[in-house]
């Protein structure tokens, strides 16, 4: 969701509040553009992220409704390197997207972010994302941490032009995040500063 968070996957570094340094992508250039998008289905929080110390966000196209998202125009190589880093692997191998572009789904492995989905097209360009191989009903939900929600909320506000209250209502309504009160979460999202990422020497291409 958040441009600065995406920059870590591309240029390398450590997210604020995180405990992991990402190597970055082979091509560190920023996305050519971004756009607010809505995807069929929904988002839920499950498993436990050692980086964010709470539940991770997963996309399930079989959930009712629509999921607010942010599309980034990047290369196949960059997408491949981002996917590798999400699975704690070294970037450097291009993914074969033929299956996901043909059938809309391709399972690369059993990992939490090793299932590729193509939920549609925008301006003639396929939208491809990764998620878990299971469905929301198959796993217990895990509440996300405040730093994680602030990162997602800042991305929603920037992409969709929402205010803090609208972003908080959306996030608090997702499966796994209902323990968060929208008014309390909105307070934390209001005036959310730019999430400046720390870059460490020796990281990135």
Image (cartoon, rainbow, N blue to C red):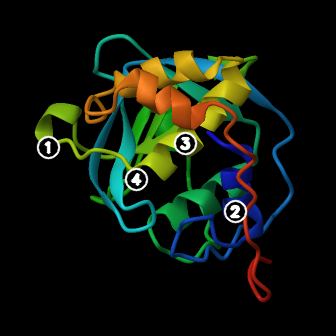
Q: Nearer the viewer, residue 158 or 79?
A: 158
Up-down relation of residue 55 to residue 171 (above or below):
below
Give how far across and how far down residue 116 sits, in percent. 45, 43
Instruction: Compute the Cα span from label 1 to label 4.
Output: 17 Å
Up-down relation of residue 59 to residue 205 (above or below):
above
Sooner in the amino-acid sequence: mark 4 or mark 3: 4
Q: Is residue 128 visible?
A: no
Q: Which residue position is annotated with label 1?
A: 140
Sooner in the amino-acid sequence: mark 1 or mark 4: 4
Q: Residue at x 66, y 43 (%)?
A: 2
Q: Secondary structure at mark 3?
A: helix
In the drawing, what numbered circle is on residue 113?
4
Sooner in the amino-acid sequence: mark 2 or mark 1: 2
Instruction: Compute the Cα span from label 2 to label 1.
Output: 29 Å
Q: Nearer the viewer, residue 15 or 83?
A: 15
Asked whether disc 1 touches disc 3, contact meaning CB atoms under 8 Å apart, the reply is no
Give how far across and how far down residue 155 sits, in percent. 64, 35
Q: Which residue position is annotated with label 3?
A: 150
Up-down relation of residue 73 to residue 13 (above or below):
above
Give how far across and how far down residue 66 sits, in percent. 43, 14
Q: 10 Å neighbourhood of mark 1: few (<14), some, or many (≥20)?
A: few
Instruction: Compute the Cα span from label 2 to label 4.
Output: 17 Å
């Amino acid at each position: 969701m958040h441009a600065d968070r995406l920059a870590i996957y591309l240029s390398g570094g450590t997210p604020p509040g995180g405990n992991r340094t990402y190597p970055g992508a082979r091509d560190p250039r920023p996305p050519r553009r971004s756009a607010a998008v809505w995807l069929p289905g929904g988002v839920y929080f499950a498993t436990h992220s050692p980086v964010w110390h709470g539940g991770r966000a997963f996309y399930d196209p079989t959930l009712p409704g629509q999921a607010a998202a942010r599309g980034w125009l990047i290369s196949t190589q960059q997408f491949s390197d981002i996917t590798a880093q999400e699975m704690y692997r070294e970037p450097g191998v291009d993914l074969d997207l033929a299956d996901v572009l043909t059938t809309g789904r391709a399972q690369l492995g059993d990992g939490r972010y090793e299932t590729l989905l193509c939920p549609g097209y925008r301006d003639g360009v396929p939208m491809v994302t990764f998620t878990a191989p299971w469905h929301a009903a198959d796993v217990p939900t895990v509440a996300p941490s405040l730093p994680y929600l602030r990162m997602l909320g800042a991305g929603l506000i920037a992409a969709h032009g929402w205010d803090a209250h609208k972003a908080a209502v959306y996030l608090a309504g997702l499966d796994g995040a209902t323990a968060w009160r929208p008014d309390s979460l909105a307070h934390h999202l209001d005036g959310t500063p730019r999430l400046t990422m720390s870059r460490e020497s020796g990281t990135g291409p």
